[in-house]
Image (tube, helix red, strand yellow):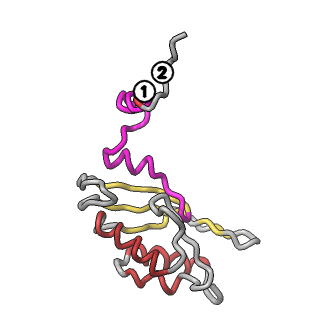
Amino acid sequence: MPGVTIDELFDGWEAAWSGRDPAGFEPWCDPDDIHYEDPLTPEPLESAAAIGRHAQRLWTGFPDARVQTTGPRLLDANGYAAAPMKLLATHTAELYGLSPTGRFVIVHGVRVFFDLYDAATQLGVLPRPGTMGEKALLMLRGFGLKREK
């Protein structure tokens, strides 16, 4: 966006995710060129209003959700940027069919990537790596089973 520094852009984006105002994304989205995806969007979102509706669902399930910077923001000569961050929140209401767990999660991300599996293990939906629960789940999915000859 013309006239906006990378830090102003990312600060505004993080404030929008933490601010509980669906209209908070509009100043940071180019209405002619916006494309947002994350693991919870079934298809790309292409307007600030769509991102605001997506954020409202997050705020419903995680009403204390907030985003914090976790490291320096990087910008290369081609205009590509990376902004390490984390989402902190407590799951207190249904979200995407998942009943509230009451658990606090910290989900690390860079730009729009975040670790969905780690979030699911923190919520207790999936077993932690290396546990018997994970091995049982993998066996149920057909991994680790040998076919008889």
Q: Answer above or below: position of 10 versus 72.
A: below
Question: Residue 95 appears at what percent x and percent y?
Answer: 31, 60
**Furthest-right residue in view?**
77
* Mark 2 and mark 1: Cα distance apart in space: 6 Å
**Furthest-front residue in view?**
149
**Furthest-bottom residue in view?**
3
Seen from the viewer's position, the closer of residues 140 and 135 is 140
Seen from the viewer's position, the closer of residues 91 and 145 is 145
Amino acid, disc 2: Leu
- Left or right: where 58 falls relative to 68: left
- Left or right: where 73 falls relative to 97: right
Q: Answer above or below: position of 29 versus 35.
A: below
129 in magenta: yes
53 in magenta: no
Residue 82, image quadrant:
bottom right
- CB-based contact (under 8 Å), mark 2 and mark 1: yes
Seen from the viewer's position, the closer of residues 86 and 48 is 48
In this figure, which residue is indicated by the disc labeled 1? 139
Q: Residues within 10 Å of mark 2 (few under 14, many from 20)?
A: few
Which labelled disc corresponds to residue 145? Answer: 2
Question: Residue 90 appears at what percent x and percent y?
Answer: 29, 59
Which quarter of the image is occupied by the N terminus? bottom right
Task: Please tell me which residue is depicted at 65% across the width and 88% down the height of the picture.
Answer: 2
Q: Residues within 10 Å of mark 1 (few under 14, many from 20)?
A: few
